Image (cartoon, rainbow, N blue to C red):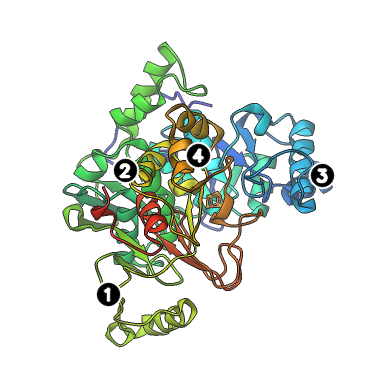
Amino acid sequence: MTNTKPPISDQTNLLDKVWDTHAVCELPSGQTQLFVGLHLIHEVTSPQAFSMLREMKLPVRFPERTIATVDHIIPTLSQLRPFADDLAEKMMSAIEKNCSQHGIRLLDPASGQQGIVHVIGPELGLTQPGMTIACGDSHTSTHGAFGAVAFGIGTSQVRDVLATQCLALAKPRVRRIDITGKLAPGVYAKDVTLVIIRQLGVKGGVGYAYEYGGPLIDAMSIEERLTVCNMSIEGGARCGYVNPDETTFEYLRDREFAPHGAAFDTATRWWKSLASAPDTAYDDRIEIDGNAIAPSVSWGINPEQNIGVDERLPHPADAPAEKRASLEEAFSYMSLKPGEPIEGTPINVAFIGSCTNGRISDLREAARVARTGHVAPGVKALVVPGSQAVAREAEAEGLDEVFRSAGFEWRLAGCSMCLAMNPDKLVDREICASSSNRNFKGRQGSPTGRTLLMSPAMVAAAAIAGHVVDVRGRL
Ligand code: SF4
């Protein structure tokens, strides 16, 4: 699956280079017919696509470029078959049947490689620089951390990619986001992405790809970059990426699906050539001071509605006119009051996991906090590894025991309470401190449930305190 075309050299940005390399033709609509190097599928958005394919009597064009896993519906307490939930069992059976019929590799729980689609792609080395990647999940932007151009797509587009390995897409403009400075202890990649969205807005990225760079991004690990790229879509961007560098290449070395030996060296030369030229012109460019970023907490009903943990909630009257209605709706739904501090807001549930923050580095940071206390009475706290590989690594380090001793539940890999298409759901008006990516109304399974987005370490601190608290005082 590796693109080993000869290096290209020009003065443009990565998005342009990858786009042009994968363009099949320009369509009369003005869109590009774009070849998709890697198609990731899961059990929720693929059954209808396979049904449409069957109706059209079409085969899967490149089964070897398609990888399947199960994550959204999979229970995290017991994955014994048949699942207790009929719909989940039907979806699981459907993806098994479809993959077997079309010769697609399915990474199910028995494979030992199952997990959230945006966690397993990177950890298996499937995600590589310069690729075009598509998946029927909004947070496919995650894979941009490697310098891939990765899009979330809808069910009919999943059908299109299965049938043709191509998508019809409009080329986005590119906004370069430079993050300078250094993160203070207790401040994480999640806080960086929340601050970007707060500053640019949930619609600020519409029509754009976000290219993240600058000293702070350069110094980040791949797992931190994955968190930042993951939430590009929450800022309205079509995708987000970081230029590939030595951190990227070292992460990929010896991963199962990455090239090996001489092929790795050849691929590395190609990957290096894809990075945006230093003097590239962008459609827009902004800079954010990383030194000024504090642990952030969403308080409203979209990720833009977030503040530093040491700040007070905004007054709608102080906001631009076009934002006031949304702020008032958020206050009403969340039962919070303008001017109140966010610190001290009581929580009922704490969720550590998801494709944003369910990786080993996230669990290590949360475990550092978990070692300092015990989950508060009345709080339900879940730790859900993003993949079976993450779970194995965490268990080898004893993190599962750290969490259990502190009163957290240690679960099996899956999306769990990020979207709650499985038994992990909020009940009624519960408030959840969550390391996931969306705080929309009803997102976590209860139509009236409330979500406060924050970093995994902040979630662990809130679980122990029983309310939102500044993790900087707990490390
Ligand atoms: S963890 Fe959440 S955002 Fe990520 S793939 Fe699963 S449901 Fe989608």
Which residue is the site of mark 2?
Answer: 13
Q: CA distance from mark 3 to mark 1?
A: 55 Å
Which residue is the site of mark 4?
Answer: 119
Please give the name of the residue rendered at 53% of the width and 35% of the height, measured from the top-left corner.
Answer: 120
Which residue is the site of mark 1?
Answer: 312
Q: Residue 206 in the image: x percent, y percent?
A: 42, 63
**Mark 2 secondary-structure assignment:** loop
Residue 16 visible in rendering = no
**Mark 4 secondary-structure assignment:** helix
Between residue 154 and residue 463, name the one nearer to us: 463
Q: CA distance from mark 2 to mark 1?
A: 40 Å
Please give the name of the residue rendered at 77% of the width and 46% of the height, measured from the top-left corner.
Answer: 89
Image quadrant of residue 468? Answer: bottom left
Left or right of residue 29, residue 147 in this image: left
* Mark 3 vs mark 4: in front: 4
Which residue is the site of mark 3?
Answer: 54
Along the polypeptide, which appears first: circle 3 or circle 1? Answer: 3
Along the polypeptide, which appears first: circle 3 or circle 4? Answer: 3
Between residue 354 and residue 470, name the one nearer to us: 470
Question: Would you say the beta carbon of the disc 4 residue lies within 8 angstroms of ligand 1?
Answer: no
* Mark 2 vs mark 3: in front: 3
Along the polypeptide, which appears first: circle 2 or circle 1? Answer: 2
Residue 340 visible in rendering = yes
Q: Is residue 53 above or below residue 61?
A: below
Is the C-beta separation of discs 3 and 4 under 8 Å?
no
Task: Name the residue type under label 4.
Answer: Val
